Image: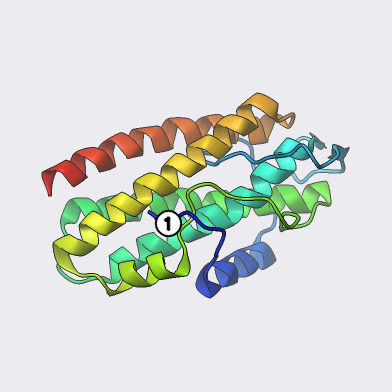
Amino acid sequence: MTKTLTISATALAAVIALAGCSTGASSGGSTTPGMDHSTMGSSSAPATAGSTSEHNAADTMFTQGMIPHHSQAVEMSEMMLRKQGMDAMITALATKIKAAQGPEIEKMTGWLKGWNEPMQMAAGHSMAGMMGDDDLKTLDAAQGTEAAKLFLTQMIVHHQGAVEMAKAETADGRNADAVQLGKDIVAAQEAEIKEMKELLAAL
């Protein structure tokens, strides 16, 4: 499975659109990964409702990385939901991923705005588990069982990357809401990884 930093134009557009319409954040949530934060300093700023203002570089990088990471998962799920004749369990999984991660994108966008932090990470930082453009094109073109197997295989890798990022946030983050989101992401996506492995084995 290819792991690259490439984000498709569709995913970037989704991030920009969600950033523009987000009005704030709320506490709690579920799913997201952590980033290398050794080169960034800590900062704090007024926060949006439901999110405390105190945060550090780990919180910022986790949030900046998880937004495009979640956006790609939503994009992949939407690809599956457009396909005809897909197994009901695959469709249900794609629906669940989209429903969970869409609102979390808005929540994290609100946090960054409240912290007065940029929406994008500085150059040179990576997001684990991201698919490349070729991976997404292959998934979009696939049909039937081939598409289901490819979606599960790619999303397992994608979720594993998110769990890695989220665990880094729970270890190094300062903002209570962001740390809780990291914990929620670990719990939710580890459960989905188990579910996807079982589905893949049954295909």
Q: Amino acid at mark 1?
A: Thr
- Up the image or down, 64 lies above or below 37; here it is below
The picture places residue 5, in percent across and down from the top left corner, at: 57, 59
Can residue 78 be seen in the rendering of this structure?
Answer: yes
Q: Is residue 16 above or below residue 113?
A: below
113 left or right, relative to 68:
right
For the question of whether residue 107 can be seen, the reply is no
Residue 142: image quadrant is bottom left
Of 169 and 127, nearer the camera is 127
Residue 177 lies, with reference to residue 142, above or below; the image says above
Identified at 44% across, 30% down, the residue is 187
- Residue at the image position 74 percent from the left and 29 percent from the top: 174
The residue to which callout 1 is attached is 2
Q: Residue at x 19, y 44 (%)?
A: 199
Horizontal relation, residue 84 to residue 20: left or right: left
Local secondary structure at mark 1 = loop
Residue closest to the far top: 171
Q: Quadrant of residue 84?
A: bottom left
Residue 57 lies left or right of residue 140; in this view the side is: right
